[in-house]
Amino acid sequence: MRGRVLMRAMFWTYTVLIAVGLAFYIAIGLIGQ
Amino acid sequence: MKKFVRDNSLSIFFLALFLLALGFQSLAGWQDFNNAQLRHHGEAIGYGRYLVSSEFGVAMLENWQSEYLQFTLYVVATVWFLQRGSPESKELDQPGPESDEEQKVGRHADADSPRWAGAGGLRASLYSNSLLIVMGAIWVLSWLGQSITGRVAYNEERIEHMQGALSYGEYLGSADFWERTLQNWQSEFLAVGSMAILAVYLRQRGSPESKPVGAAHEHTGVTG
């Protein structure tokens, strides 16, 4: 059970990392930094 | 803890490599940017400022988009296209999305299948293509990000050289945008294509990306 939770944690680590990276640099470009 | 590391070692290994490489890329990019500034009699900027710059953004995202395009295309192309003898290919008589029974969809789902696989209707359709949808969305968004940050970085350079700034539409048709894009695409396509065909004749013992060492060259879709 704990193994499954940790596996899911890895999934979300990557997903959030990618989403934040995309959103952050799109925003940087949009405000013209 | 030991079990967690073993069970997830592949994703942990690549996450660590990613963070290290991105960290060093940012340091090298910062130095390179400041060197160019000094050559043009501009002012050097701090590391923090470089991290929130479009110059760093475009350098990062132009590579992201090509990688995600590569995987998106690979996921969808391998549904239909085959390569005789390749572990990257399905068996030669199975092109296409296959039957619900083979894919364990709808009433063919097992007790431990993901819930949406057994749901049927729109949910099963969405879940059946969820890898393609998400990888494709990351590709589109990173390519969009490349174009937005690329334009800002390119315009800064143009202004330094007393040239007018480009609109977003003009930038999308510019050589800068397409050179950044295509230089990354070509390498991905070559790597994927060569992997599919080299793996027909070459082996890596123990890797699921390879056929078993003793498998015949003719055998397709066997991983070991």
Image (spheres, rainbow, N blue to C red):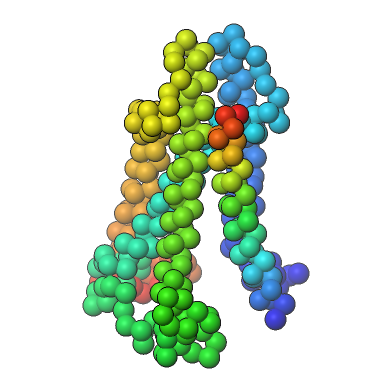
Q: Is residue B64 left or right of residue B192?
A: right
B198, B184: nearer the viewer: B184
Residue at (55, 34) in percent of width and height: A29
What quarter of the picture does the C terminus of chain B occupy?
bottom left
How many badges with numbers are in the image?
0
Residue sitting farthest toward the right: B1
Taking the image as drawn, is residue B193 in sight?
A: yes
B93, B126: nearer the viewer: B126
Taking the image as drawn, is residue B56 in sight?
A: no
Residue at (59, 8) in percent of width and height: B41
In the image, residue B162 sits, relative to residue A11, either above or below, namely: above
Which corner quadrant of the image does residue B170 belong to?
Answer: top left
Which corner quadrant of the image does residue B37 belong to?
Answer: top right
What quarter of the picture does the N terminus of chain B occupy?
bottom right
Q: Is residue B29 left or right of residue B174?
A: right
Residue B78, percent from left and from top: 32, 65
In the image, residue A11 sits, relative to residue B122, either above or below, namely: above
B43, A20: nearer the viewer: A20
Residue A20, percent from left and from top: 62, 49
Residue B22, percent from left and from top: 61, 42
B165, B97: nearer the viewer: B165
In the image, residue A2 sits, relative to residue B131, either above or below, namely: below
Residue at (44, 49) in percent of width and height: B140
Residue at (49, 35) in percent of width and height: B148
Q: In this view, does B99 lie to the left or right of B12?
A: left
In the image, residue A26 sits, relative to residue B221, either above or below, namely: above
Q: In this view, does B130 lie to the left or right of B87?
A: right
Residue B107, percent from left and from top: 42, 90
